[in-house]
Image (tube, rainbow, N blue to C red):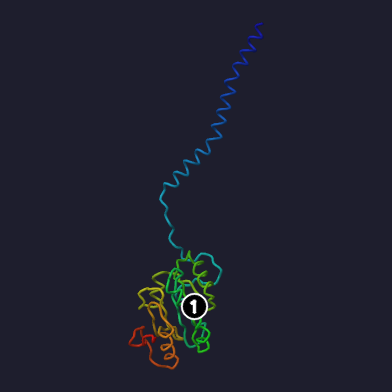
Amino acid sequence: MKQKLVLVAALLGLLPLTFACSKSKSNAMREPSGNATATATTASAAPVVRAAPSASAAPGSGLVEPVQTDELFARLKRLGGKGVLVNAFASWCGPCREEVPMLESMASNLKRDGIHVVYVAFDEPEDRYKAEAFLLANDVKSPSFLALGGKAFRERLAPNWPGMIPATFLFDSNQRQRYFWPGQAFEHELMPIIEGFLAGKKIDGEANFAVTPPRTQ
């Protein structure tokens, strides 16, 4: 009889331990999700800090080549010919959506005359893919580059350029700027200057109605 009582007592003593272990395991299983919630809350409360753009561009399709100003001038020289029409654009620029297709439609004829058309994107380096998508959408075949260096690139490319987009520049075969069209330019504004340049006339300057006649209706 005594042995039975001891056995019953032992069994009764095990029951609370079993329930305690089950509760402990249950809490242990819930604990990671509780910690994850706390971590997520802490992370969402932390301020978001954007990293500064890197000196090199993000990977892209290769349609737009990232360059510093000196690299751009070296590539312009390699093109040869009599001169280069450089267009500064950006994928977010409204007027560029009209100007780039117009320039590309002129590119073949200009190349026959010795003038190359080149595009330079001024999107942020991490947005290189946007510039490439813009050029693909406009079926651009002419050489295209991505400006690296920000303000330093702009000042080296054209010291007289305040920085508006779009902007178009005519460089001669020595990479010397001969003419500058600030803002959106149109074919009737470009061609008299280009033809004058090809004819050997003194055309150095910036676009204004004293040099370029207004569009006729």
Residue at 51% over, 64% down: 58
Q: Label 1: few (<14), some or many (≥20) within 10 Å?
A: some
**Residue at the spot of label 1:** 101
The amino acid sitting under disc 1 is Pro
The quarter of the rendered structure image containing the C terminus is bottom left
Q: Quadrant for the N terminus, please.
A: top right
In the rendered image, which quarter is residue 92 located in? bottom left
Horizontal and vertical percent for residue 82?
A: 48, 88
- Residue pictured at 63% horizontal, 9% vertical: 5
Q: Nearer the viewer, residue 133 or 55?
A: 133
Q: Which residue is painted at 55% across and 70% down in the image?
A: 62
Judged from this view, the residue extending furthest toward the top is 1
Q: What is the x, y in percent for residue 11?
A: 63, 16
Quick one: which residue is furthest to the left in this view? 210
User: Circle 1 sits in a helix, a strand or a loop, which is it?
Assistant: helix
- In percent of width and height, residue 56 lies at 48, 66
The front one of 25 and 157 is 25
- From this view, report whether residue 132 is shown above or below residue 181: above
User: In which image quadrant can residue 89 be found?
Assistant: bottom left
- Residue lying farthest to the front in this orientation: 217
From what the image shows, is residue 140 above or below residue 32? below
x then y, percent, for residue 14: 60, 19
